[in-house]
Image (spheres, grey):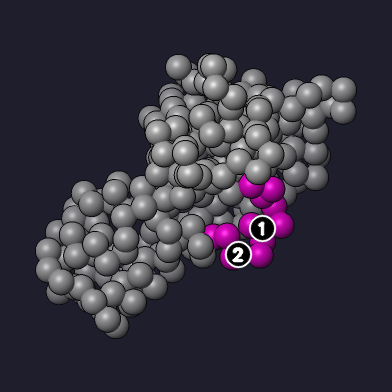
Amino acid sequence: MTTHLLVDFGEVISEPQSAAAVQGMAALLGMPTTTFRDRYWAHRAPYDLGLPAADYWEDVAGRRVRGEELLTLRRLDIESWTRLNFTTITALRDAHRRGAQLTLLSNAPSDLAAEIRGTAVLRGLFSLMVFSAELRLAKPDAEIFDTALALAEVAPEDTLFIDDRPENLRAAGVCGIGTHLFATAGDLRSTLDGIGLGAVPPSRPRWGWRRRGARLGGRGDERRSGADLLRPRGVAPTCP
């Protein structure tokens, strides 16, 4: 039985970034749209891992970006990723009603992560939200899956990971996590309707060894990864 859904955000829970949104950001920087799109993605990985917004947008623009221009770019970028797919949300809400625990796992910069955390419909659906910028880890790094499962205190074999990128699904599969390649909300609903969903039985201990009071990045833990902070020393991680 699947007791836990691990769910991507961008282009799964949110609609794809629109052409108009990309054009608006490109126009603000005075760039051709194609050039902007290439630079937007070429510099995105460090931003998803916690690079400050000003540094990211200066990398994209190739010049200094400050003040109102920076604030507007940050706002437009957040807006471009937060048009929610309510058909997907409805399918996930139904799975939650059937007993499944839901965790959000997203490669997202700090700006976007804060906006997602503040979205009421998502707060009511996900018991845990895990973001790359907060962990300094990103998909498809296997360690972020190990960390997410440790934080959620669930086993990989009880988990279904839902994402639209095959490389992320392959990495999760290596960790023993079930996977679903997201294409449409209808396909997702069909998959969820066809599997057994439920809560962890009371007699079965939850997976993971989260230490009470452990904090990511706490003093004395500088040389340990996010997942390692949630596991006693000497215990092997789930993902190879």
Q: Residue at x 23, y 51 (%)?
A: 43
Q: What label sits on residue 22 in the rendered view?
A: none
Count neighbours of disc 2 (C-alpha within 10 A) and say few if under 14, some if 14 to 19, many if 20 or more.
few
Residue at the far front in the pictured view: 220
Residue 81 to residue 151: above or below: below
Q: Position of residue 49 (x, y in %)?
A: 36, 48
Depth check: 117 or 185 in front? 117
Is residue 160 among the parts visible in the rendering?
A: no
CA distance separating discs 2 and 1: 6 Å
Which quarter of the rendered picture does the N terminus lie within?
Answer: top right
* Position of residue 208 measured from the top left corner of the image (x, y, whole percent): 66, 27
Residue that badge 2 annotates: 119
Q: Amino acid at mark 2?
A: Thr
Q: Is residue 209 left or right of residue 8?
A: right
Task: Please determine whether, in this image, residue 20 is positioned above or below residue 56.
Answer: below
Whether label 2 touches label 1, CB < 8 Å: yes
Return the residue at label 1. 123
Q: Nearer the viewer, residue 25 or 151?
A: 151
Q: In the shown orientation, is residue 46 left or right of residue 158?
A: left
The three-letter code of the residue at mark 1 reads Arg
Residue drawn at x 24%, y 56% as measured from the top left:
40
Asked if the stretch drawn in magenta spans residue 123, the answer is yes
Q: Residue at x 54, y 17 (%)?
A: 234
- Chain part drawn in magenta: 116-128
